[in-house]
Structures are given as C-alpha cells and as structure tokens.
C-alpha cells in the first residue's frame, strides 16, 4: 500500500529519500484542480453563428474548466430555430443550446428545458443579471433559461441634423415634439427642399401590428395593456399614459411631422426612410443597428425617452437552455456560467480580435450584455448604442393573460379610432377599454 510505504520512507529512509517524498507530496498538493477534476467529460453546445470566434471560445472555456472538453457546434443562422426544435424533439439535441425567446417557449412548454433553480443557487454573479429577464424566462414559476441578450426599443436620432439646427437630444415628450417639427420644417439636411419629416411610424389601421407598434410609446409613457388584480386582468391601455401617448402621436400626425405611410409599409421600409435621410427620428430595436451604422456611422445617436422612463418593451432576445434529457447537465451549466462572466462578456462586446461585435453571422451588431454592471456604449464610445444600453435596466415583459391576442385586436381598433376624425383620443380609448373588459370578464 502507498501510505505505509510513504510512512516507512519518512521514518527510516535516507535524508535524500525523505526530501524527495516530501517534495512529491507538496507538488501534488499544489496542482490546481478543475472544478470538475475527473472524469473527463465532453459537453455539446450549439450556437447560432459565432464561427469567427469558435476557436477562441473553446480555448478560453477549456483553459478555465480543464476537466471538460467542449464540443462546440456553430450552426447556420438561417434555419437554426428549426434545427434546434427538430433535434430536441428527436432527442438528438445538444446538452446546452442558445436560442431566441420564440424557440425557447415551445421547448419549455414541452418540458424539454431543465429547471435551473438548483444551478442558479451556485452561480456566481447571478446578482448582475437583469432580473426582469429571468422572470420572462420562467415556466410555472421556475427559471428554465438564462438570458444572453434582449432586443430593446430606443429612439434613433440624426445627430448631424441636431448639430445643424443647434438643438439638443430630447429629454421629454415636449422636447420630442419640438424636434419633430424642426426636422420637418427647418431643412435639417440643408438641401433647400421640404423633403424631410420628423419621424415615420407604422400604425396600420385596425391591424394588430398597430398595437405592437404602440407598445413602446405606451410603456415609456408609464402605461401597460392590463394589470393583474388577484388573477383578474382589467384593461389599462386607456388610462392616462395611453391617452398621453396617443395624443402625442395624433398631434404630430395633424402637424404633418410624421412621414406618410401606407398600411403595407414594413419596419424595414421605415428603416430605409431613416438611412436615406428622409426622416430624422425612428423608434426601433437594436436589430437595425448594423444597417444604421453602415449607412450613417457617427451621424446617429440613440436615446431612451423620456429620461425618467420606468419601463421599456423589447422585441425578444436570446437565452441558453439546458436539455432536460442530458446526463451532463451540471457540466454543461458551467459553460453558461463562463459565458455570462464579466471577462467573457467583455470579449463578446469588445471582440477577441479587437473587432467589436465580430460574432460570426452577427458581425457588426451590438452585443448587448444582460449584465447590469457593463455598458457596451461606454466601452465602445458609441453614442449610437447609448439608448439601447440604458434601456436594459428598465426591461419588462409584456403581461400575458387569457384573451391577450383578442385584447390586442381591440386595442388596435381603438388606436385607429383615436387617429380618425370622429372621436377624441379619450372617447376612442374609453370605448376600446370597455370592449376589452367585456372580453376579459367572460
């Protein structure tokens, strides 16, 4: 046996043999151990894109977790959602996958995502993650995914137009109104023609898309669609915040400060108006940033309006889920912990190769961190990103309740009526609220 042998050497061996054995013992004790020292395990992780950084990710992760081997599969972005859903249903999926929120939801509902309560209890830096995102990624009160990013809304503004007109970014809705008028009537591009507008906004009459486009204005005015009162959900979109937001929109429309748009105009077409220099402001999510940066560069900034906003809506995001069928759950979760660490998030923001945002298929996009202690806009010195980064502290999920889709349709009709000539904003919203409550009370 080893222990008697060591004892005999230490008790009766020569001085040289004693020193040799002591040195071996001390050296063995000094060897740094991986959190998962043995046995060696292989974990399979799927990512959409990230091809450019695959080698960096594997090298850095395995340097920290030497007891693991990372089988990192960077899947094509184009059909990634279908690949994940098909693989998980057929039990051929990864131990851990990065998916958007719309793919996570059916996986969670089918019981294919492992509840993370036991893992979160041991997770370092959990306090730094935006709490509202954890609420969004919960099923039956249990967190079943961890956020990597979200796509918040912010107001894009032409900085060069502000400079030419000697104006400052808006801090209030009143400032916003003044700015919309100036961008429409004071020739901000200096071409001597009346060919610009303050903003463009797609609110097609009677279409539920109108309700979705209205949400950023409603939330940032301090309102919501409905409120939970002991399991009942009375409609709230017609309260003072909703009326204030619609009065603002109607005022801008009647003043001619909103670009004319057809009911079929898409968000991409609105963005095209902005990058072409036909409008000076646009409410959008961060998905537009690569196109804006390429077309306009430093001539654009983003703000969160008003500055005392309490709530911001967003257009989805991405999260890691842990496969409920994996037998390597604990090992795979170390990858999530590593990914969300401050050091890794800095590399994702600033780039392993010094090219910010160069994450494979998403090259050029802003990497919005779910960590509240990191501000990518400040790190990159990019005013274009400022409003989107600030919004992370105010993200709130849309309230989902029975008949939510039906209420959105009612809200869309109320918006159309509020913009028409026959009713005031208050009358249209009161009628819409009454109809919505009738649906919710059934």
Image (cartoon, grey):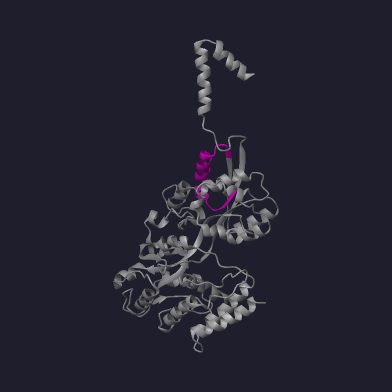
The answer to which of 49 and 13 lies nearer the viewer is 13
Above or below, 282 relative to 247 = above
| Residue at the extreme front of the image, as rendered | 230
User: Quarter holding the C terminus?
Assistant: bottom right
Above or below, 418 relative to 169 = below
Q: Residue at x 42, y 66 (%)?
A: 304
Q: Position of residue 120 (x, y in %)?
A: 57, 49
| Residue at the extreme bottom of the image, as rendered | 422
Queried whether the magenta region covers residue 355, the answer comes back as: no
The answer to which of 338 and 84 lies nearer the viewer is 338
The answer to which of 388 and 191 lies nearer the viewer is 388
Q: Quarter of the image holding residue 34?
A: top right
Q: Is residue 83 left or right of residue 17?
A: right
Q: Residue at x 49, y 64 (%)?
A: 152
Q: Residue at x 34, y 77 (%)?
A: 182
Res 206 seen here:
no
Q: How many marks?
A: 0
- Where does the magenta region start and end? 45-68
Q: Position of residue 181 (x, y in %)?
A: 36, 78
Res 130 seen here:
yes
Q: Quarter of the image holding residue 247?
A: bottom left
Q: Position of residue 431 (x, y in %)?
A: 56, 84
Queried whether the magenta region covers residue 49, the answer comes back as: yes
Q: Residue at x 51, y 60 (%)?
A: 150
The answer to which of 28 and 266 lies nearer the viewer is 28
Above or below, 151 relative to 428 = above
Q: Is residue 406 left or right of residue 150?
A: right
Q: Position of residue 139 (x, y in %)?
A: 63, 59
């Amino acid at each position: 046996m080893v222990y008697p042998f060591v004892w005999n050497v230490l008790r009766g061996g020569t001085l040289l043999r004693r020193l040799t054995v002591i040195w071996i013992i001390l050296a063995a004790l000094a060897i740094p151990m991986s959190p998962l020292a043995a046995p060696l395990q292989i974990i399979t992780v799927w990512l959409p894109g990230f091809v450019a950084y695959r080698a960096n990710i594997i090298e850095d992760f395995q340097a920290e977790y030497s007891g693991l081997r990372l089988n990192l599969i960077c899947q094509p972005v184009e059909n990634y959602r279908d690949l994940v859903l098909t693989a998980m249903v057929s039990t051929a999926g990864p131990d851990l996958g990065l998916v958007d929120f719309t793919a996570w939801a059916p996986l969670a509902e089918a019981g294919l995502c492992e509840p993370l309560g036991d893992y979160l209890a041991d997770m370092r830096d959990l306090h730094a993650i935006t709490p509202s995102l954890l609420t969004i990624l919960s099923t039956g009160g249990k967190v079943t995914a961890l956020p990597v990013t979200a796509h918040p809304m912010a107001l894009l503004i032409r900085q060069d137009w502000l400079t030419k007109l000697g104006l400052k970014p808006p801090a209030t809705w009143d400032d916003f109104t003044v700015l919309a008028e100036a961008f429409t009537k004071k020739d901000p591009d200096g071409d001597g023609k009346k060919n610009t507008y303050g903003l463009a906004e797609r609110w097609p009459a009677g279409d539920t898309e109108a309700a979705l486009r209205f949400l950023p204005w409603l939330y940032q005015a301090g309102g919501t669609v409905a409120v939970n009162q002991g399991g009942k959900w009375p409609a709230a979109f017609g309260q003072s915040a909703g009326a204030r937001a619609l009065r603002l929109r109607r005022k801008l429309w009647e003043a001619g400060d909103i670009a004319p748009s057809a009911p079929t105009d898409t968000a991409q077409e609105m963005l095209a108006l902005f990058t072409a220099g036909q409008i000076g402001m646009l409410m959008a999510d961060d998905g537009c940033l690569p196109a804006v940066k390429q077309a306009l560069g430093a001539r654009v900034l983003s703000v969160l309006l008003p500055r005392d906003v309490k709530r911001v809506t967003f257009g989805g995001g991405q999260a890691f889920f842990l496969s409920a069928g994996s037998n390597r759950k604990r090992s795979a979760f170390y990858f999530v912990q590593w990914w969300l660490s401050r050091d890794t998030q800095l590399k994702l923001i600033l780039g392993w190769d010094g090219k910010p945002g160069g994450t494979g298929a998403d090259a050029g996009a802003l990497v919005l961190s779910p960590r509240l202690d990191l501000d990518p806009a400040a790190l990159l010195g990019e005013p274009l990103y400022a409003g989107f980064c600030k919004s992370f502290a105010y993200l709130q999920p849309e309230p989902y309740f029975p008949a939510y889709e039906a209420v959105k349709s009612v809200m869309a009709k109320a918006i159309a009526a509020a913009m028409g000539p026959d009713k005031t904003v208050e009358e249209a919203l009161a009628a819409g609220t009454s109809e919505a409550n009738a649906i919710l009370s059934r």
